[in-house]
């Protein structure tokens, strides 16, 4: 990879003074960074000319002509083109045999049509880089020559002083040197769902650039505040550019199905040439090397045509298309058809967390209020709300239906909150009854001890003035949404007027508002009652408080209360919840007061602590069931996320990926772990656990032995991973023979999606980059759909085996007449056009119908197939070439002999008759059993016999669904005047049809017997020889 490695970033560890020294041309003002003068215009132009534009490099493109010609590089097509050329040459050497010309034309048309189809399929590939460029702004603000100007993004150079404003995207990788309440959203790059508070201070040596919060990445979105920074990477050298390189520079891997088909094609290629050469040589020896051209045509070429299943590519494509359509109905869009088979072979699913396993929708799941644990929504005191909901009325403009101090908590969530509600039209929003499915059914939703978590939450039904759309910071949106479910938020907000606000930042860790009730009358002394509303990190908020609100009255915060608070705080935090504390205080001041936290002109101590809200990005409803199915199917599941280990591990427990207490891997090399919630000193040796949790920063230093130990676990949580590390995980799995399915929705998932055997992107929440890099798009963002894909893939593999077995079963019966002709001189029982009509006509419909075969009941109870499992196994070849073929050859030969007997010709009279009789321009009349047969009768009988052999061969294997089409084609080829002349067939006696029925019954009995023995004695070595 040409771009610099992620590890080369050092600017995040440098002070402003050190940055000013490193980037002297930027003329950074160390004392006042926002007043920096920036690059000189001439210097910027020189750098632009030297380094190139701030843009992502497009990948090399292949011309349409080259792409089209590449389609012909296929052993099937090479073999058929060779046969067509030889057939054409043979025709020009002997123009009386017109059938050679027909065969050549048909073969060439087959190859051209199939190559045109595959050409257009490949043309549908979408340029990944175009999706990356959608993340980039077109204009930006920079400081040059002490002037703030607007320039094209492509003209930014390293050293430019960049201005980042709310609502804009960051145009390059920028080291922040000054900021004011700057919040950037970079979830698609870093994996963090919550916007990050940025700062300008340097970080410690051990902190990498992704956790520094002082380097804004190219493509990040500014959701609040503003900042000033130095452009330290541009174009392909930015993090976004490196992700693009990781994605677009990867060599396109062959799918498992393509590998198996190629292996099968090579087998057919070699066997066809070998068989053709051997039979041709036998013919030459039998005839004393006379009529070599005729032997070459009727022997070598016909054997090649018989061995090559010309219809197989079309059959496989049709089966894949059928399954793809079936999957589309289940909201799974397959960008590449052959990826269905890879689904079935998947041994590892490496899934992103945010937006894939979870909803990417921050939600308040629990609150701690009045020393009580409330799971979900609070309980009402009486049936007022129930009465309203049955009448489909709006929520009441009161909070008196709830016990204290819940009304205060709901008020704080609604008012001390910058999220906004947008109404987009009149609608009825159906909600379930306002009640909770509590973890403890005996005690309702009020707990004096820590409850178990539940994800089951139901909400009251209410009629809204319009459909709600809440916008803002995810945590604040979650709080407002929670309040909106239990109260009339618009009414609450209308009650208060905000007179002063201090926004949240990462240093203070709190958000403060001072409000007064709207329209409140000023008291006689000229003062007004104000309320301080405070929310923030609970451990910070509680330090401002002297008492805690209870149901009846507030009580002082003593050591016991402090311990209960800490217990609740730890409980939520250790279970992956983000916690927010709330406090308030009423005070009186002049109605025209101007408050300032710097001046300290309002009481900011001895507040009343109201409670804690626990927030999380909840798992998708079907995720846990999907994980359970994956475990049942023997598939390893890895969570690969940019989130903190504790958050990731908590979600892993929620979805059933981890069934035991939270354990975090500390050092893979020493094989030691530490259990969360106990002192770090309490380290236990690793036992044979099925799962592990690993921090991303450990991965680059791990040896192959460490990887072997780690990947031996069935379930792993990879936390704080970078795009490079996600790609490394996929590569290490593939090196160990795993078939990896990667799911994701962000830009940071793109390299791994591209590298994986199956890349699965989310269709709703997924970024364009992820969708373009993936092979599969889940249109409903449902992780559970992957399980459906795996089941379909396993079914496809089974049905493809049946298709190939069905197709190959025709091969030897098509070759045997040639052998009989060369060795015994018996008239040819089948022609090259008849062989082509089987491969391209009569056998395609039954072969495709096998795609509709139902799966076995235990298909998802078996482990994934082994790497050594072949699509075309020795047992399958034995079945097709010997067992089933033998039955068909026997009955087809019997039908063939019957037609001659029907016409008074004995079987023994057929020996060595082909060179003189049963052809056009025979040496004379043929005599058998006292009967004399002229030229016309000889050819007609031969064609009848060939038709009998043909229809027995074809009809013997038809499936129920394809029987009508199959018989219709046979009738057309045999009974239609003109067509049957070209095919070399004549209508046989009607009794010849019974031979096909006999062959079909024998095949059915044989297969059912074979299946019975396989079910009865599955581990018997002899029986297993018949299992394919």
Image (tube, grey):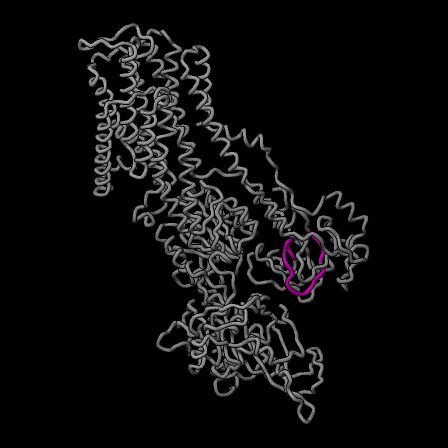
Q: Looking at the picture, tell me which residue is in the foreground, 990 or 100.
A: 990
The relative height of residue 554 versus residue 305 in the rendered view (above or below) is: below
Range drawn in magenta: 216-232
- Visible in this render: residue 1014? yes
Q: Looking at the picture, tell me which residue is in the foreground, 202 or 1024.
A: 1024
Is 747 inside the magenta-drawn segment?
no
The relative height of residue 916 versus residue 516 in the rendered view (above or below) is: above
Which quadrant of the figure has residue 691? bottom left
User: Residue drawn 66% across and 74% down?
Assistant: 502
Percent from the top left, x then y, of residue 168?
67, 58
The relative height of residue 958 versus residue 983 in the rendered view (above or below) is: below
User: Residue drawn 22% across and 9% down?
Assistant: 932
The relative height of residue 35 versus residue 393 in the rendered view (above or below) is: above
Q: Which quadrant of the rendered structure holds the N terminus?
A: top right
Percent from the top left, x then y, of residue 56?
65, 45
Percent from the top left, x then y, of residue 244?
60, 46
Q: Main secondary structure of the magenta part?
A: strand
């Amino acid at each position: 990879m040409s771009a610099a490695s992620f590890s080369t970033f050092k600017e995040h560890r440098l002070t402003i003074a050190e940055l000013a020294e490193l980037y002297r041309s930027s003329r950074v003002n160390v004392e006042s960074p926002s007043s920096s003068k920036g690059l000189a215009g001439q210097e910027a132009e020189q750098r632009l000319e030297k380094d190139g534009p701030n843009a992502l490099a497009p990948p090399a493109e292949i011309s349409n002509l080259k792409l089209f010609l590449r389609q012909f590089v296929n052993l099937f097509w090479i073999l058929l083109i060779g046969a067509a050329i030889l057939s054409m040459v043979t025709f020009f050497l002997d123009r009386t045999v017109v059938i050679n010309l027909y065969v050549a034309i048909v073969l060439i048309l087959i190859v051209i049509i199939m190559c045109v189809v595959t050409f257009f399929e490949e043309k549908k590939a979408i340029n990944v880089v175009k999706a990356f460029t959608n993340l980039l702004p077109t204009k930006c603000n920079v400081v040059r020559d002490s002037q703030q100007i607007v320039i094209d993004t492509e003209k930014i150079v390293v050293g430019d002083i960049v201005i980042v404003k709310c609502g804009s995207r960051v145009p390059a990788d920028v080291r922040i040197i000054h900021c004011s309440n700057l919040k950037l959203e970079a979830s698609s790059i870093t994996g963090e769902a919550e916007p990050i508070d940025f700062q300008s201070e340097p970080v410690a040596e051990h902190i990498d650039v992704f956790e520094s919060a002082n380097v804004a990445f190219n493509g990040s979105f500014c959701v609040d505040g503003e900042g000033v920074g130095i452009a330290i990477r541009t174009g392909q050298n930015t993090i976004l550019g490196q992700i693009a390189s990781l994605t677009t520079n990867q060599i396109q891997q062959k799918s498992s199905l393509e590998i198996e088909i190629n292996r099968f094609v090579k087998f057919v290629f070699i066997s066809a040439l070998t068989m053709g050469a051997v039979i041709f040589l036998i013919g030459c020896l039998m005839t004393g090397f006379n009529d070599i051209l005729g032997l070459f045509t009727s022997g070598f070429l016909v054997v090649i045509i018989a061995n090559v299943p010309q219809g197989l590519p079309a059959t496989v494509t049709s089966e894949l298309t059928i399954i793809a359509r079936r999957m589309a109905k289940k909201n799974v869009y397959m960008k590449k058809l052959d990826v269905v088979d890879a689904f079935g072979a998947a041994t590892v699913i490496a899934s992103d967390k945010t937006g894939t396993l979870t909803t990417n929708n921050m939600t308040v799941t629990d609150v701690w209020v009045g020393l009580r644990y409330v799971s979900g929504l609070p309980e009402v005191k009486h049936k007022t709300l129930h009465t309203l909901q049955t009448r489909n009325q709006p929520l009441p403009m009161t909070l008196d239906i709830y016990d204290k101090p819940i009304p205060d908590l709901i008020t704080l969530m609604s008012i001390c909150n910058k999220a906004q509600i947008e109404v987009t039209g009149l609608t009825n929003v159906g909600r379930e009854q306002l009640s909770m499915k509590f973890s403890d059914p005996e005690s309702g939703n009020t707990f004096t001890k820590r409850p178990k978590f539940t994800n089951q939450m139901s909400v009251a039904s209410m009629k809204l003035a319009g459909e709600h759309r809440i916008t803002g910071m995810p945590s604040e949106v979650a709080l407002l949404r929670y309040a909106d479910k239990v109260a009339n938020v618009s009414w609450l907000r209308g009650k208060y007027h905000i007179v002063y606000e201090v926004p949240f930042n990462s240093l203070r860790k709190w958000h403060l508002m001072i409000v007064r009730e709207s329209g409140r009358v000023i008291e006689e002394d000229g003062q007004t009652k104000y309320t301080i509303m405070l929310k923030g990190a609970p451990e910070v908020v509680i330090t401002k408080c002297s008492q805690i609100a209870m149901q009846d009255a507030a009580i002082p915060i003593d050591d016991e209360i402090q311990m209960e608070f800490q217990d609740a705080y730890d409980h939520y935090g250790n279970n992956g919840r983000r916690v927010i504390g709330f406090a308030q205080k009423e005070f009186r001041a002049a109605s025209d007061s101007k408050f300032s936290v710097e001046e300290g002109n309002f009481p900011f101590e001895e507040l009343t602590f109201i409670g804690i809200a626990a927030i999380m990005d909840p798992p998708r409803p079907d995720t846990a069931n999907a994980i359970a199915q994956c475990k049942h199917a023997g598939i390893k599941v890895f969570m690969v996320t940019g989130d903190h280990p504790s958050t990731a591990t908590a979600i892993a427990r929620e979805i059933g990926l981890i069934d035991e207490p939270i354990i975090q891997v500390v050092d893979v090399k020493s094989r030691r772990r530490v259990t969360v919630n106990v002192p770090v000193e309490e380290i236990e040796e690793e036992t044979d656990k099925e799962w592990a949790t690993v921090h991303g920063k450990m991965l680059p230093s791990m040896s192959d032995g460490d990887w072997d130990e780690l990947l031996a676990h069935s379930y792993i949580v990879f936390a704080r991973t970078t795009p490079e590390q996600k790609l490394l995980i996929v590569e290490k799995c593939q090196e160990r023979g795993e078939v990896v399915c990667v799911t994701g929705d962000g830009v940071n998932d793109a390299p791994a999606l591209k590298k994986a055997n199956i890349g699965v992107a989310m269709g709703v929440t997924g970024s364009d980059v992820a969708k373009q890099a993936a092979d599969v798009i889940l249109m409903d963002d449902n992780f559970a759909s992957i399980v459906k894909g795996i089941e379909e893939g396993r079914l496809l593999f089974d049905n493809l085996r049946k298709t190939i077995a069905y197709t190959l079963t025709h091969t030897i019966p098509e070759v045997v007449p040639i052998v009989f002709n060369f060795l015994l001189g018996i008239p040819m029982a089948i022609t090259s056009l008849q062989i082509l009509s089987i491969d391209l006509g009569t056998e395609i419909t039954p072969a495709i119908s096998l795609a509709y075969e139902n799966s076995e009941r235990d298909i998802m109870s078996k482990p994934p197939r082994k790497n050594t499992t072949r699509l075309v196994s020795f047992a399958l070849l034995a079945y097709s070439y010997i067992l089933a073929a033998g039955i068909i050859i026997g009955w087809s030969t019997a039908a063939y002999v019957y037609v001659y007997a029907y016409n008074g010709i004995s079987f023994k009279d057929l020996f060595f008759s082909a060179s003189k009789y049963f052809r056009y321009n025979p040496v004379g009349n043929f005599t058998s059993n006292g009967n004399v047969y002229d030229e016309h009768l000889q050819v007609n009988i031969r064609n009848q016999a060939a038709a009998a052999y043909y229809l027995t061969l074809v009809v013997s294997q038809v499936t129920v669904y394809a029987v009508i089409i199959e018989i219709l084609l046979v009738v057309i080829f045999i009974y239609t005047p003109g067509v049957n002349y070209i095919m070399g067939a004549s209508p046989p006696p009607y009794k010849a049809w019974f031979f096909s029925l006999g062959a079909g019954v024998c095949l059915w009995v044989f297969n059912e017997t074979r299946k019975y023995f396989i079910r009865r004695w599955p581990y018997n070595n002899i029986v297993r020889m018949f299992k394919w």
